[in-house]
Image: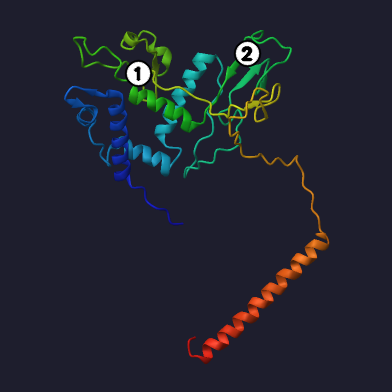
Amino acid sequence: NYTTPIDLQNIAKAATFVARAALTAAYGEDGDDDGGNFAANAIAELSYDDETLVDLADCLFTNGRCDTLSKYSKVERVNNREETGQDVGIGADLGSPPNYYVSVYNNRNGQAFAYIDGSIYGSYTGDEEYGKNSGDAVLVRPNVLEMSIHGLLNDFLGRGSYDESSEDNEYSFKSCQASSDCSDVTYCSSSGDLAVCTGGNECVCSRSHYHLALDEAIIPAPNNYTGMFMVSEDDEGVSPMYSEPYWSNDIGIHIYRDGGENGAWVISFGLIVAGAWLVGTTLMKSRLRKEKLY
């Protein structure tokens, strides 16, 4: 199978443009200096052979089980376990080569769920009191790609929060294996940030958050397992409410051998039209041969 090679040079140019555009929009104008000039000076042109870019390109286009995604998702797993007290594991990986099929939206593919008295629910309104058992929790298990992006964004964006007015601008980030190792970090507290650990194994300031992208008109079916949904009674009809159907084998299928009288008429008409085109094509070919045009 032939695959089109990825043009990293164009990706690098696009990444530089987007980064500078974002900084320009945030900067605005200040006297004679505008945001465009400031962004161009602040953000260097990304090289197409940059080590990080090449590494991520390999993960996203060649080997979805690469070491980079693996190490970031593993640290995120540890962080989630420390925060919730439950180890929900790591969701599906991309595979090798990467496969971006989203699959059915359930607890194995990013849907949040309630874990109550040892059972999993998409949402819960039952009689069992939430919190009665020590293991009760509301959890989510993102897939490897989502966990890795979460950690990478924290790693790349969470390194500029320490006080640059301090005497020591050459700040050394604390090494870590999990966010619990970052509890005594002070360089994030100046702006009220939370220090977290990422796959880079350094304590950085939190910058990314999960957002469960589910149509506002669709809600999890109460007291059912994940992957079951219903239309919200509060839906005002402003949402497109798009969802791909889940064709369960429980739905069943009916096969009809007899199309009825209309079916016979359609088949007959099709045969007549096909015959007419065949005769017309033959006559046209004969005429073209006679005129020495074929």
Disc 2, SS:
loop
Image coloring type = rainbow
Q: Is residue 105 above or below residue 203?
A: below
Indicate left or right for 116 with 68 as reference.
right
Residue farthest to the bottom?
Answer: 290
Q: Crowding near pointer 2: few (<14 within 10 Å), some, many (20+)? A: many
| Picture coordinates of residue 190, whole percent (x, y) | 31, 9
Nearest the viewer among 254 and 20 is: 20
- The residue lying at 63 percent from left, 19 percent from top is 114
Nearest the viewer among 184 and 10 is: 10
Say which quarter of the image contains residue 218. Answer: top right
Residue 204 is labelled as: 1
- Inspect the image, locate mark 2, and give the three-letter code of the amino acid beneath it: Asp
Nearest the viewer among 287 and 167 is: 287
Indicate left or right for 159 with 261 as reference.
left
Residue 31 is labelled as: none
- Inspect the image, locate mark 1, and give the three-letter code of the amino acid beneath it: Val
Disc 1, SS:
strand
Q: In the rendered picture of this protein, how many numbered marks are placed on residues? A: 2
| Picture coordinates of residue 213, whole percent (x, y) | 53, 29
Q: Crowding near pointer 1: few (<14 within 10 Å), some, many (20+)? A: many
Say which quarter of the image contains residue 71. Answer: top left
| Picture coordinates of residue 34, whole percent (x, y) | 21, 27
- The residue lying at 64 percent from left, 18 percent from top is 115
The Cα–Cα distance between marks 2 and 1, rounded to whole angstroms, is 30 Å
| Picture coordinates of residue 96, whole percent (x, y) | 47, 43
Q: Which residue is mark 2?
A: 136
Name which of mark 2 and mark 1 comes first in the sequence.
2
Indicate left or right for 187 with 264 as reference.
left
Say which quarter of the image contains residue 221. Answer: top right
- The residue lying at 28 percent from left, 13 percent from top is 162
